[in-house]
Structure formats: C-alpha cells, structure tokens
Amino acid sequence: MSETPKKAAITGHPVAHSRSPLVHGYWLKKHGIDGDYGRVDVAPEEAQAFYRNFAASGLTGANVTVPHKETAAVACDRLDEAARTMGAANTIWLDEDGRLCGANTDWEGFLGNLDQGAPGWDARPGTAVVLGAGGAARAIVFALLARKFTHVHIVNRTVEKAQKIVDEFGSGTSAHGWDNLGKLLGKADLLVNTTALGMTGKPLLEIDLSELPKTALVTDAVYVPLETDLLKQASARGNPTVDGLGMLLHQAVPGFERWFGVRPEVDDDLRALVLKDLGAAS
C-alpha cells in the first residue's frame, strides 16, 4: 500500500491572503512529492483547543501566523531555542510519538535572505539598528546576536516595548526612542526596518539617512512594495540593500524539510512566481 500523502497548512486568522500555499506548492511540484499544503482559518476563540488537539486536525504540521504564534507555542510539548526565547512558534509538527513540537524560523528567514542577497554581510559583525519592537524585531535581534553582532539598538516610538526585548535578550542590546535615531545611525553597520511603515497602504517611513555610513547594509521586512521608500533612499545614496521578500521565502524552508523530508531551495523561479502573484494582488 502507498503511504498516505502528508498534509500541512498555514494556520491563523485570517489566512486567505497568505502566500505560503504558493511557496510550498511550488516546492511540492518541483520535488515530485505527493503531499498537500493548504489554509486553515482558526478563529481566535478556537485557537487554544485547535493547537492543543493538533493531532486531530489531520495535518502532519503547520505554519502559524498572527495572532496565534504565542498560543501555538504554549500548546507545544517541545520548543526549539528560538521559539522558547520568543514565546512564539511559527512552525509546528507532530513527532513520531505524537508530541507537538514547535520552532520559530523567522530568524532563519532573515539570515537566509541576507546570506543570499548580500553574501559576506556579516564578515565583520558590528552594530545594528533595528526599527520597531514587534515579533519580527524580536526574531531579528535573536538572529543578529546568533551571528555575533556586538550591539543591537532597538528603536521604537514606544520605548517601553523596545525595553521589553532588551529585558529578554540582555547584554548586547539597548532600547531607544525615535529621537535618538540620528546619533545611532552614525555608527551603524546594518539598518533593519521591521515596522509596517512604508508598506502599501501605510504611512511612509520618514527617516533621515544622512548620518548612516554608505557602507552600511539596509534591509526592510516589508516586501509590498518590493522596493520600499527606505530602500530607494538607501540605494540612491550608495548603500547596499536587500528587500524583504526573501525573509518570507527562507523562513518556509525548515518547515517544508521537517514535514516532507526534502530541504528546498529559494531559487529565482520561486521568487518570480511570488512576485507575479504579488503584482496580481496589488
């Protein structure tokens, strides 16, 4: 008898807009795998029960998106270091004993994107400035400390939110308000925007890059539009830049490997497929 095809899905609320089925569907087809990746919209009031009884869903594993990453982490029997540190899981699976395991791969997505888009970017890890203090910022701080950056400045309009991340990560991080940004940029080797500012339909990220060294790498977690105003400004003054689309693609790699047994690549065809879909949706 042939094995039952493995099924995975993006879970969260809402999930209709998610590009994850497009990404995983591309890899399933490319590798000739008899599997399925779909969407499961989990209403907030049902989330706790859904993840606690994940084995009843019929899924081998799943990605978890907002607002359920924290709920999924609590439901897991085992968490990797990143998910444990951040209190949030974006990738879950059932092990051979039926236990629910969770990981946070957002930090791997960030690093994979920069490794591909700017090879050698961390050859001399120094000082980074991270704008924003949400879940993406937390994952990126984790990633930068893993790559031995000596200091990560977290800049947020509400300093208390940035301070919460500092309280979690401690040495090598510091919290700042927006008024400190100019001074911090003057010594930055890397600038990362994790806020929604600059995203299509949101206000622009108003920032003066005049103090930023032209050797500093600039990247944006926003990928709609692909080239944000921040990246345009940075590129125009000669800074190397990397867009945010690769973070979305690379964070999906570990989950696919876990569920379907093949480690996929983020290649030009996949990127073109997702860009075409983004263009059709805009």
Image (spheres, helix red, strand yellow):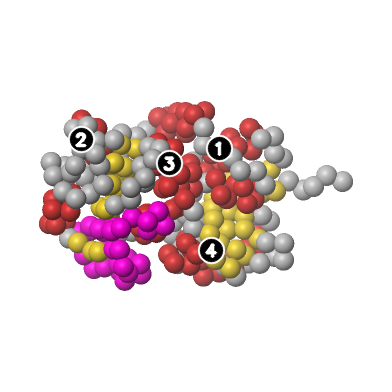
Q: Is residue 277 visible?
A: no
The residue that appears at 56% across and 49% down in the rendered structure is 254
Q: Earlier in the sequence, mark 3 or mark 4?
A: 4
Q: Is residue 186 above or below residue 88?
A: above
The spot of residue 31 in percent (x, y) is 66, 35
Q: Earlier in the sequence, mark 1 or mark 2?
A: 2
The residue labelled by disc 4 is 80
Q: Residue furthest right?
A: 1
Of badges 2 and 3, nearer the viewer stands 3
Of badges 3 and 4, nearer the viewer stands 3
Q: Is residue 148 magenta?
A: yes
Left or right of 186? Residue 37 is right
Disc 3 to disc 1: CB gap under 8 Å: no
Q: Amino acid at mark 1?
A: Glu
Q: Earlier in the sequence, mark 3 or mark 1?
A: 3
Left or right of 183? Residue 231 is right
The spot of residue 171 in percent (x, y) is 31, 68
Q: CA distance from mark 3 to mark 1?
A: 13 Å
Disc 4 to disc 1: CB gap under 8 Å: no
Label 2: which secondary element: helix
Q: CA distance from mark 1 to mark 2?
A: 30 Å
The spot of residue 170 in percent (x, y) is 32, 69
The residue labelled by disc 3 is 115
The residue that appears at 33% across and 50% down in the rendered structure is 125
Read off the magenta span: 145-173
